[in-house]
Image: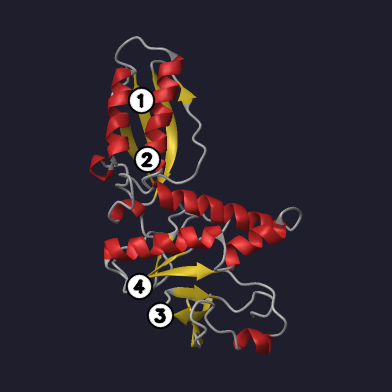
Amino acid sequence: MYINDVIFECYQDTTFDQVERSINQYLDALRYQGQILGREFPIAIKDGYFQLRLVTPEPNSLHGSFLSPQGKKAIEGLKQAGLLSPKIKLVGEDLNSQASADTQPPWQILYTTYVHTCSPLRSGLDLSPIPLYQIPTIANGSQKQAIKWQEDWEACDQLQMNGSILEHGALHEISSTDSQLFRRGYDLAKRIEYLTKVPTYYYLYRVGGGSLAQEQARTCPRCQQDWRLPEPELDIFDFKCEPCRLVSNLSWDFKK
């Protein structure tokens, strides 16, 4: 990931309300296209300009060619609010983050956890994140569906990890093929595969279980066929069903 400084300069008289609204609309468009990562973007008020720092998947993620229709409209909104087009300065690579995928993988996974802020689409080669703006638009001119699914999955993961409230309901959403979150994500994975022509799998979280032997004997929850791998892939996935496009782990209760 990369760190960028972004500056918005005023070219005419304006108001804080206009500036705040137009900049936030621009940031929302970038976020729902996968061009920036995270949710909170503090804006510093300077003498005649406004400045913020953003994290992006790649050095050129903020290039105008990646903008969604909403992003292009937001650029016009900045001008109407009395702001020039944003000036972008690449600060450098983020030391504490994972590098984005640099090649098209033979297969990919819809995968996230509550500690991740990167793209939920991952390479099957090394689990590196694939920037969402690099794939065809999923729906309605942006990648918002994927971002919203990711937010919901991570919220459920956080609840089940905390184990204090709504744990069982949250766990059901991320580990069961009968859940609403699964249906949304599974349909999303199929849509991404159709658009990219790359086999796209959905990650099904697994914890609990009666014993290690029972876990190892688990079959695919959709087709009930054997799906256990001879060796784990990417140190996480112990099960993989090619026809159903599902991957899963040996229960974390028994996984070494």
Position of residue 173 measured from the top left corner of the image (x, y, whole percent): 60, 61
- Extreme-right residue of the structure: 164
Q: Which mark is residue 169?
A: none
Q: Which residue is mark 1?
A: 8
The image quadrant that residue 69 belongs to is: top left
- In the rendered structure, the answer to whether residue 78 lies left or right of residue 255 reads left
Q: Residue at x 36, y 55 (%)?
A: 131
Instruction: Please give the residue where the numbered disc 2 appears in the rendered image.
Output: 30
Q: Mark 2 packing: few (<14 Cα in 10 Å), some, or many (20+)?
A: many
Which residue is under mark 3?
242
Q: Earlier in the sequence, mark 3 or mark 4?
A: 4
Q: Does residue 173 sit above or below 56 in this rendering?
A: below
Residue type, label 4 = Trp
Of the two numbered discs 1 and 4 on the same chain, state the one appearing first in sequence.
1
> Which circle marks residue 107 in the picture?
4
Task: Compute the Cα span from label 1 to label 4.
Answer: 40 Å
